[in-house]
Every structure is written in C-alpha cells, then in structure tokens.
Image: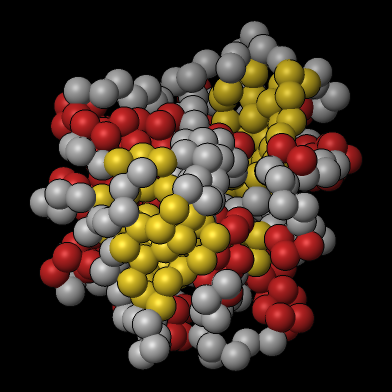
Amino acid sequence: MKSTAEAVVIGAGSFGSSLVYHLAAHGLDDVVLLDRFGVGEQTSPRAAGLTQQIRRERETTQLAKLSVEKLVRFTEETDILLEFHQSGSVKMARDEAGVAQVTWEIRAGQELGLDIRPIDPDELAERVPWARTDGVQAMWITPSDLFLEPRQVPQVYTAAARAKGVTVLTETPVTVLRREGNGRVTGVETSKGPISSPIVVDAAGAWTRQVAEEAGIRIPVVPIRHQLMITEPLPSVRNEQPICRVIDANVYVRPCWGGLMLGGYETNPLPVEMRDAAPGFQIADMPLDLGVLRGLAASVRGQFPVLDNAPLQTYRGGLPTMTADGKHIVGPVPGAEGFYALTGCIVGGLSISPGLGEMLAQRILTGASAIPLDLYAIDRFAPDFDDEQLVEACVDAYAHHYAEDYAAIG
C-alpha cells in the first residue's frame, strides 16, 4: 500500500479515470486512483453512452467538442481499443419553445465551428427508418456526434493511466480527508491505510458529498435516479443510425445491441440521500420503475412508434449527480487548499469526461486551462446551502434538462 503520492483522485468512474490519465500525460509521475468498488462499476456503466456537442454555454460546447475529438483519437493516442459509432445525432422540436431552441443551437454551434445544420423529413427517413416526423416542427443534425458502450470510458482511461504509471487501488474506500489546522487537505485515510498528498480530488460520483462532508466540506450535488431501457433486436435498427432526441419530452433514443435504447428525464425524479444508504449500498441496489420508461416511450409514440410495446432486453438505472443550476462543479474548493471537486455530471458527464479531465489536469498543474473552468467554480454556490432547497433546485434542473428557455438568451 502506497503511503505518499503527488495526487490522489477519489472515484474510478469516467471523471476520475480521465483525470488521472491526463495528470500522468501532463507529467505528474506519482498519481493514485482510489475507488470503494471496482473501476467504473457504479453509474458509468449504466449511462447511455451518447454525446451531444452543442450545449447552452460556450465553454461546455467547447469541452463537449474536445471530448468527441479525444474519443475519436483515443486508440491512435494510446494503442488501447475504444469502439464507438460516429453516426451523428438529431434533435426534434414539437413546440414553439423547441423551435427556438433548435434555431439557437444551430446558430451557436456554427459560430463555434460545429457541424450542425437543419435536417428535413426526407433526410431523416433515409438516415433513421424507424423514426417519424409527426408533430415535429424543426430539427437539426450534428453528424460528428457519437455513441459508445459506456463502460468502456472508465475502463480504457484507467488502462491508459496504468500504462503511464498511475496506481489504481480498488476496493479501497476513503474514510477521512486529512486536513491541517488552516484547512489545507494533506491526504486521505483509506480502509487500507493513509496516503499523504498535496493534491486530492473528489470525483466520487454519488458518494461525492459523503467523502467531503467527513472533513467538514460541503459540495452541493444531489444524486438523482436516471433510467433507460433497451429493446430486443429490431429488424430496421443499425449502429450507423443517429441518436434522436425530442426536446419537450426530455427523451433520447439510439441504437443499442441490435435494438433501441430509450431514456429520459422524468418530471418527478427520485433523489437519493446517500447518507441514509446502507454502508454496502451499490447502484445496482437502487429501486427501478419500468412504468416511468413506458410513460416516456408513450410520450414519443408519434416519432418512434416502433417502441410501442417493444419487448425488452433490459432496463437499468444510475445515480448521476445534479447541481442547482445544471452545470458541472470543477476546480479548487475554497478554504481547503489542495482539494478539488470534479462532480455534478448532470447525466451527460461520461461523454464530456475526456475534455473535463484534460482541462482540470491543466488547471491543477499550471493554474490555468485552455478552456476556462471559471463557469464551473464551486464558489458560485453558498457554502451554507439549505439541503431542502438544494434538492428542490436539482430536481427541477433534472426535470427540465432538455427543454430550457433558449428563446430568452437570444
């Protein structure tokens, strides 16, 4: 068991694994990645594994674009196989607010050099034979968006990190953050012994708040259940077909295992208080509700009639972390020198983790990053936040994840 390190990262999901790889790639020699379970065993493998490069904020779009570029180059860069399908994605608007959003996203994306453009019903029918445009008023397509099997991301980044000398310790929960009298974080206590380090990063996913609160540090995130289902194989489905999203329904659909994956953002989601969870709780223990998914499928029957009563291979759920304003929390934590947060995955964290990992590595090692991270600073929130209000705000951010008021931002 190591007793010292130049940096300790807590959590071997997509965020943590990307960060340790990029810390090592930028020259940090002695990095440790810890996880209370195995590599990428909790929410990451239960994600949808799809990308969308256009985002509401300029910086988030830049990070999402960078992440897609890094996923495409990953095998060439590391000699580790990463399989993906760069078949693009389509977004559908069925109401006036959605049309405003599609219009805004096309303009904003093109201004940032993104290959996003309108798509008409004829092209959609050619690309996605199982989709219909009944009730659809506007659409865009981004041909460079991609999807992949989500468990690959933490697995391949951890493998690449190991190849660069990173120490990966699984089944090693952090029990205490070690702090000096001035508040500086100086390392961690684990179930297998202490590790001293001048840099500690909390990327513990659903356990992020628990890890920090043991040392009196509050991080305003709430784990919220997100579910998806995958149908049995369907004759018209191919991996070369794009992801489809319907804005007002908060629903996405993509090819998966020969069938279709459907997931979405329910209006009354289930927040999970991890402090009340049993010590051995894992994401697989979380209760699921197939009725929610069937309801989401019914809400897009006009666009995806093939999903009506389609037989299922499986359905699953993860616990992504939400923030009150729907943006990530990335960077140093005031009052705790040496301590950083990498959390608030906002459900789409797996797809943006390559870019966030590289930018936070740059910020830790040089004090700045090529894509600024100021937008995601934790000090935008009050350190004495009210838990009840936080949960309410995070639930609202989740429930309106797709359908925001884009018309208001011009």
Looking at the image, which is closer to me, 344 or 164?
164
Q: x%, y% of residue 209?
A: 58, 68
Residue 253 in view of the camera: yes
Closer to the camera in the image, 67 or 235: 67
Q: Residue furthest right?
A: 291
Q: Residue furthest top?
A: 235
Position of residue 370 relative to residue 143, above or below, is below
Question: Residue at coordinates 47% horizontally, 39% vertically from top-left?
Answer: 170
Q: Is residue 339 left or right of residue 397?
A: left
Number of numbered discs overlaid on the protein picture? 0
Question: Which residue occupies 57% across, 72% down?
Answer: 214
The residue sitting at 66% across, 71% down in the picture is 394
180 relative position to 385: left or right: left
Residue 271's quadrant in the figure? bottom right
Applied colour scheme:
secondary structure
- Quadrant of the snapshot with the N terminus: top left
Is residue 365 placed above or below 160 in the rendered structure? below
- Vertical placement of residue 398 versus 261, above or below: below
Residue 201 or residue 125, whichever sits in front = 201
Q: Position of residue 147 (x, y in %)?
A: 45, 33
Residue 304 visible: no
Q: Position of residue 355 (x, y in %)?
A: 30, 52
Image quadrant where residue 285 sits:
top right
Report the residue at 17% width, 74% height from top: 367
Relative image position of residue 10 (x, y in whole percent): 44, 55
- Specify the quadrant that holds the C terminus: bottom left
